[in-house]
Each structure stands twice: as structure tokens, then as C-alpha cells.
Amino acid sequence: MKVVSIVGTRPNFMKLAALIEEIKKHKIEHILVHTGQHYDMGMSKLFFDELELSKPDVNLEVGSGTREEQIKSIKEKLEPIIEKEKPDVVVVVGDVNSTLAAAETANKLGIKVAHVESGLRSFDNTMPEESNRVETDKISDFLFTTEKSGNENLLKEGISKDKIFFVGNVMIDTLLNHREKAENSKILEKLDLDKNNYAVLTLHRPSNVDTKEGFENIVSILEKIQEKIKIVFPVHPRTQKNIDMFNLRERIKSMKNLILTEPLGYFDFMHLMANSKLVLTDSGGIQEETTVLGVPCITLRNNTERPVTVEQGTNLLVSIDANKIIGESLKVIDNKIKRDGKIPELWDGKAAERIIKILIDYFNTHS
Ligand code: UD1
């Protein structure tokens, strides 16, 4: 079996890390392609170093642009590589523009597509990720799901049961594989924080940071919460740019309990989350990681494509309503609610093992 796998953005690296370890274990021929969608040191190379991923065999260096520009450019640059390498399968992860572009390229060339983290649906068509998920799943040959809702969504969309495999969560594989290293992080000392006495915030969804009104609403929420607790805020490049575009820098600077940092590395960020009182986020993956870490998470969105984190985990979805978010945050800060949650089925560190076994078995019987 020969595999080409694709990464492009920060969360892709954590997901593929677990798969690459398994690929190495089985000595499978493997070509790693980085699309270059994320390119800053702190958004890309840092994770390769920390997770000990080998340098990508190819970097398409597509950089930033609109969704259409990124997808077009990846397809043009990836096609000759896949034609030359002729893999049995192209592995894509998650729901970013790089995921869809690579899946479409492989599909056009008649190469099988394996989609890891398939079937998640927010049912919110304004999110580019939702289109990326639906379009990628339509053309995938192996659909690996992280939670049962994914299987149900795919079946409802008419995808054949034979292609769908509930395997667990590769992002959680990576978290469990690196827990010890994360525990040794010195980020709390560096930022002068006490365990269990600060909140962590991440923010990068266009719905929150790409309009002045949306971003101002979030800033008003933070103004209230930081009166009660320190908030650490590693700022995503998209968000950093928009703080200035919407003239919010002064308001943000004047919050004395809001601590802004550059994007953090994997170990520092895991350590920061694991020891926090509360996480506020609009990220997808962080909803899952907080569930496994047992840390209360309030999701700053109106929907989630990861319902198991709400039904079984520590995630709370209260919509983008300032009063509700402030109210629920204060309850957590004042210990008025206890959200233990449980670990979802098959989030046991063995998802990558299951995925690679399914692929090996398939290509052994179909070669
Ligand atoms: C992308 C994904 C999103 C994912 C997120 C994780 C899509 C549609 N979106 O969003 O699903 O949750 O990555 O971080 O694929 N930039 C830099 N340096 C970088 C990368 C980006 O400065 O290394 C800046 C650029 O100004 C760029 C902007 O951030 O225009 C947004 O980057 P982009 O990759 O388009 O989207 P993200 O918001 O990162």
C-alpha cells in the first residue's frame, strides 16, 4: 500500500501525527504533502518539531487567499504530484480548505480518498467548514468517523454503509500520546498563573471575528468575565489582524486581566487547558480536547458539529448570547455547576491503529 497524506492547517498536524506513527510502524510507503495553507512558524513548523513529524516531502506553498483561491491553487499544484506518485489512497483529515481541495484532486484522478473525521455536521451552511465536510464526504471512499452522530449523518445523506467506519478520534490519540510532555510545560510559571484559577480563550471563526458587530459582542463578554478571573488569550493571526481592522486594540488593552499571547505550541497549550478553570472557544478540536481533559468548555457559537462533547462531555453550547455566556461562565468560576462528563466511546488513543488496519486489510484483499 502506498499512501499520500495531506496537511494544511494547524489542527491537521495533530490529527495526522497519530496516523503517521502508525504508518511508520507498518513500514507503509508514505508521502507527506503540506499545502502551505498555514505557514507561520507558530502555526506550522513548531508543531512538526514538537510532534516529531518528519519534514513534509512536498510543500505546495499556497499561502493565504479566499477559499476559492486556496482550493484552486492546491488542486493545480497537487495534481501533478499525485499523478507522479500514483498512491493507492490519499488520506485527508478534518474540514479545512486543504482537505476538500486534496480530496477533489485525488477523486478526479481516480485515486481512493480516505477522510478522517468524517460525518460531522453543524447544519450551518454559512461555515466554509460545513461545505468542506459535506463535499469531501460525498467523494470519499473510506469515511472514518469520530462519533456515532457522524455515521447517522452520512447514512441520511445516502452514503453507503460499507464505506463508513466508526473508529474514534485521532486528535485524542495525539493528546494521550503526548500527555507526559505536556505536563512538563512551564507555561504557567511563564505567564504567572495559578492552577485552576484562570480561563483560556481562543477565537478565530469568521462568525465571531470577521464582522465588527460580532467581534464587539465578544469583547463586551470578555470585559465582564475578566472582572472575575484572568483570561489567557493566544491570538490567532486572523483575529490579530481583525483587532486592528475594527479598532478594538485599545479596548482589549485596557482589560487588565486579559493576557494576550502569540499562538502557543502544542505542549504549552495542552498544559494551559488541562490546568484551567474554564475554556472559552469557537474551535472545533478544543471542544473535544476539553472533554477528554475534563475541563469545562463554553463554546462561543450557535451550533456544534461535535454533539457528543455536549451530550457526554464537558462542553456547553449556549449560543452567541452575551448574557448567557457571561452567566454560565460565572457559574463555572463560582463553582456553582459541576461538569464532569465522560469520555466518548472509542476516544481511547487507538483510532489511528484502527484506521490503518482497515486500510491495510482492504488493500491486501483488493490489490
Ligand atoms: C483555517 C480553517 C479553519 C480552522 C483554522 C485553524 C478553512 C476554511 N478554515 O482557518 O477551519 O479551524 O484554520 O486555525 O480552511 N494567517 C497567517 N499565518 C498563517 C496562517 C494564516 O498570518 O500561518 C492569516 C492570514 O492573514 C490568513 C488568515 O490568517 O488570511 C486566515 O487563514 P486561513 O487559513 O484562511 O483561515 P483560518 O482562519 O486559519
Image (cartoon, helix red, strand yellow):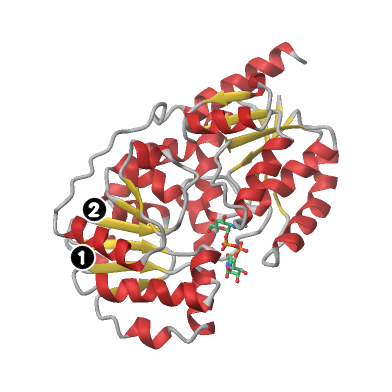
Residue at mark 2 to residue at mark 1: CA–CA distance = 10 Å
Pinpoint residue 186: horizontal percent, then vertical percent: 27, 59
Which image quadrant for residue 134? top right
Q: Position of residue 85 (x, y in %)?
A: 80, 37
Q: Residue 332: where, in percent of width, then height?
A: 20, 55
> Which of the numbered marks, if any, corresponds to residue 9?
none
Q: Which residue bears the numbered disc 1?
A: 193
Q: Is residue 147 left or right of residue 74?
A: left
**Label 2 secondary element:** loop
- Which residue shows up at 27% across the image and 43% down it? 294
Q: Where does the image place residue 290, in percent across and percent down from the top left?
A: 34, 47
Amino acid residing under circle 1: Leu
Q: Residue furthest left?
A: 335
Quadrant occupied by the C terminus = top right
Q: Dividing the image into 4 quarters, which one contains the N terminus?
A: top right
Q: Is residue 349 left or right of residue 125?
A: left
Task: Please give the name of the residue rendered at 53% of the width and 55% of the height, measured from the top-left corner.
Answer: 10
| Quarter of the rendering containing residue 64 | bottom right
Numbered circles on residues, count? 2
Q: Which residue is mark 2?
A: 275
At mark 1, the secondary structure is loop
Above or below: residue 69 compared with residue 146 = below
Q: Is residue 31 visible?
A: no
